[in-house]
Amino acid sequence: MKHFLTLLDITANEARSILARAGELKAMQAKGVKHHTLAGKTLGMVFDKASTRTRVSFEAGMYQLGGHALFLQTEATQLGRGEPIEDSARVLSRMVDGIMIRTHGHDILQRFAEYSRVPVINGLTDLTHPCQILADVFTYEEQRGLIAGKTVAWIGDGNNMAHSWINGAVCFGYKLCIACPEGYCPDDRMLAAACDLGADVEICSDPITAAAGADLVTTDVWASMGQEEEQAEREKAFAGFQVDDRIMAEASPNAVFMHCLPAHRGEEVSASVIDGPQSVVWDEAENRLHAQKALLEHFLK
C-alpha cells in the first residue's frame, strides 16, 4: 500500500505528473468541464487540528471529482475517547477508499498508515506539510516557469513547512536557503536525509543573506498551532526575521512572495509585502484545491 506521508514518498517523475495533472484539472474547472474521475469513491478526513484551507480544498476537491468526503473531527469520533489509532485505521480503511489525516505527532500518521488498507495522505503534522509544497511549486511555475535551478528563500521557523521545502528540493531540484534564529533550525535528521538524496540546502542565521537573489521568498507564522504559549518568547527570538520590503529588495526583481496562511501582518510578514505586487498568496491558497485533486487522483483512482 502506497501512502503520501512526506514528499519523499513520491518520485520526482510522479511529482511532475501530479503538477501537470493539476494544471489540466484547473483548466477544466475554469471551463465548467465535468471531471468525475473519482465517482463512487469516498475520502475519510480525520482532523485533530483546526483547518480552513485543508478541509475546504479536500472536501470541495472530492466533490468536483465526483466522489464524497467525510469530515471526521477527533472529538466527535471514538479516537477522541481513546480508541487505539491502530483499531481506527483498521475499521475506517474497510469503509472508505482513502484517508486524509491532519494531526499533531507525525508518529500518529505513521501508525495509522501502517494499519490502513487504503492510501493515507498527510494533511499536516508537526513534522511535515507536503500538500502545501505541491500547491506552492504549482503556483510558482504558473507564474514564473519551471522551479528547477531556481532559488527559494525560507525565512523564519525551522518548522513543518521548512521541512517540507527541504524535501521538495529533492523532488523539484531548486536550491533552498533557510534563515532561522539560533535554536529554531530545521531537524538535523530531515536535513541530512534530503541532502543524501541530492537536495541543495543552505542554513544561515541572516535573512538578508538567505534572500539575496532568491526567486521565491516564503515564510510562516512564528508560533504554530500548539505553540501559543511561546508567542512572546518567539517574538523576541524572531525580531529581524520579518519578511518586509527590505528583505524583498534583496531578492530577484522578479521574485514572488508566498505564505501558507493564516498570516499575521506585522509579525512574520509586513502588510506591504503580503498585500503587495509580488505576493501570490491568494493564487497559492486556491491552488491547494487543484494540486490536491491531482494528488487524490494519483492515489485513489
Image (spheres, grey):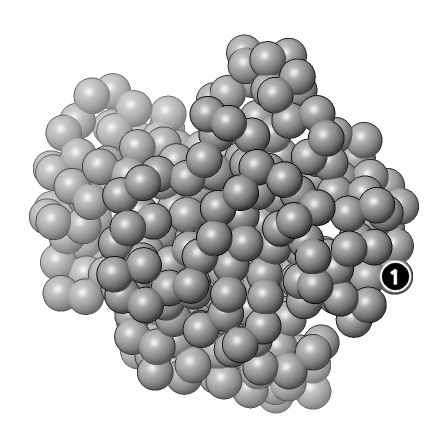
Vertical position of residue 300 compared to residue 54: above or below: below
Secondary element under disc 1, as helix, strand or loop, is loop
Give how far across and how far down residue 130 sits, in percent.
Answer: 42, 56
How would you rate the neighbour count of disc 1 (Cα within 10 Å): few for under 14, some for 14-19, many for 20 or more? few
Vertical position of residue 224 compared to residue 170: above or below: above
Image check: 110 left or right of 137?
A: left
**Which residue is at a point 25% across and 61% down the rendered structure image?**
196
Residue 17 in view of the camera:
yes
**Which residue is at a point 12% across and 49% down the rendered structure image?**
114
Vertical position of residue 39 compared to residue 92: above or below: below
* Residue type beneath disc 1: Pro
**Residue, disc 1:** 277
Nearest the eye: 21 or 150: 150
Q: Quadrant of residue 173?
A: bottom left
Image check: 6 left or right of 91?
A: right
Residue 259 in view of the camera:
no
Vertical position of residue 3 compared to residue 142: above or below: above
Give how far across and how far down residue 151 sits, in percent.
Answer: 59, 66
Q: Quadrant of the N terminus?
A: bottom left
**Which residue is at a point 41% across and 84% down the rendered structure image?**
17
Nearest the eye: 23 or 40: 23
Image check: 146 left or right of 163?
A: right
Nearest the eye: 179 or 109: 179
Q: Quadrant of the C terminus?
A: bottom left
Give how far across and how far down residue 54 sits, in percent.
Answer: 52, 50
Nearest the eye: 151 or 235: 151
**Which residue is at a point 59% across and 61% down the rendered structure image?**
152
